[in-house]
Amino acid sequence: MTDRLTARETVALVADDATFAELPDPARESAGPTGSTGPTGSTGPTGSTTSAGSSGSAGSVPDGPLGWPGYDAARARAAERTGERESVVCGTALVEGIRAVLIAFEFGFLGGSLGERTGDRLVSAYAYARAHRLPVVPLIATGGSRMQEGMLALTQLQRVARESVLTREAGSAQVAVVRDPTTGGGWATLGAGADVVLALPGAQVGFAGSRVRPADADPAAYTAEAQRAAGAVDAVVPPEELRGTLGRWLRLLTRPSTAPAAPPKPLGAGAGGGPAGLPATGREAVLRARSPERPRAGAYLDAYFSHRVAIHGDRCGGTDPEGMLCGFGDHEGRTVAYAAQTGTATRPAGYRTAARLIRLADRLGIPVLTLVDTPGAANDAEAERQGAGAAIADLFAAVAAARTPVTTLVVGEGGSGGALALAAPGNTWATPDSYFSVIAPELAAAILKRPPHEAESTADRLRVRPQDLVDLGVVRGVVGVRDRARGDG
């Protein structure tokens, strides 16, 4: 990647004009060569401490906490070259009208490395964000920890991780932008640890920096595009689109709501209104749900949201973009998170991505809409090796633990536990061209050792039709059909 931007140029790229205000530089007590005591002074209502105004080495100890020969001189040259006193610039700004704390790394200052004073600035910035309930946007370009400060530099990652956790617990979103390069501990904390990760095209991104990889390592594996393919980056965004994309994310993630999402209106057959639109038999319900003409998740999401943004990947090396769509969207001026099956057998990575989505929405207080549509969980050998059972269990747990309201609409096939894991207990609805079953009728007949021609009657005995599900108390109602809702609403 060429034409690497400075920290302040990156801020200008994403911030609305003339809105960036730099935060005060936190003070630090002097310390001996065994270490330093950290920032001084009490944290006031602004969440930051008063500036020490020092441009010397960490803790004002000559050549830093380790007494590394030439460290002061290296810092002085970096300051002269970049105009900065440290490797990060922290402040607040408006991004498409949304106020946020920006943390911009200056790669020209000792490779954007993290030292003790870097850690001080990061801690202060996160504290300010929590005190003012602002989202945090790390704009990362770093080679990792600063060698001249040794283990004291490396332990800054623990400080950053704690600040990230505290900010997450406070309900503030963290949206990282990874630039070129983002490697080492900066990637493993501020980057990969963010709620949402955006990346610039061609950026070098990976835990292992270019000088510490195996000699025969494929450089293509350490790129933004490769990290997205592995489910660690949500989107690769061109620089000219970054402000708009970041602004949409921040707007959607900073609008909590306590009201449940309304179930979408039906789009398929039988959406006209009366009970006549419902399937007459269990077999008919199954055939309608399996029809290739029936609207799938994409059509429902497009009709429901005025705009939406997608999260991508399970953060464990897997993706299921063909089987599970997850993200956040605007529905009638309100943010709603969504996790939608697409009608295929859901892979383990799809379940883990949905669990990630639901937990993020829960932390941010955003209601969730789930769309159930799968013949069942993927059951091939590779799915087992990828942990299908554990992934489904994790999604069951995420839905069960959610404090934010979850609404479910069954839009097609509801195939066994692989579908039920995404369904909200007590707030699940069905469309007229859907069914929900303990297992596909054909498989149920096989399990019961009945001949294949009895699959049709088995579908009736299983009571899989939408109206059957209402009568059984499994779903609240059939959307778009009058008189097919339970009395509890």
Image (cartoon, rainbow, N blue to C red):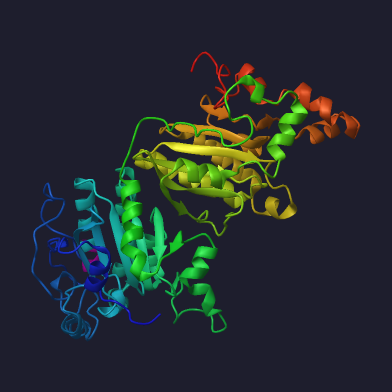
Q: Is residue 92 above or below residue 145?
A: above
Q: Residue at x 74, y 51 (%)?
A: 380
Q: Residue at x 48, y 18 (%)?
A: 489
| Left or right position of 197 against 264 | left
Q: Is residue 439 visible?
A: no
Q: Nearer the viewer, residue 100 or 84?
A: 100
Q: Is residue 75 above or below residue 195?
A: below
| Left or right position of 228 against 404 | right
Within the image, what quadrant is residue 1 found in? bottom left
Q: Residue furthest front?
A: 272
Q: Nearer the viewer, residue 274 or 415?
A: 274
Within the image, what quadrant is residue 259 found in? top left
Q: Position of residue 151 (x, y in %)?
A: 33, 69
- Region of the chain picked out in magenta, as a range: 116-120
| Left or right position of 115 against 292 | left
Q: Position of residue 148 (x, y in %)?
A: 28, 78
Q: Residue at x 67, y 30 (%)?
A: 436
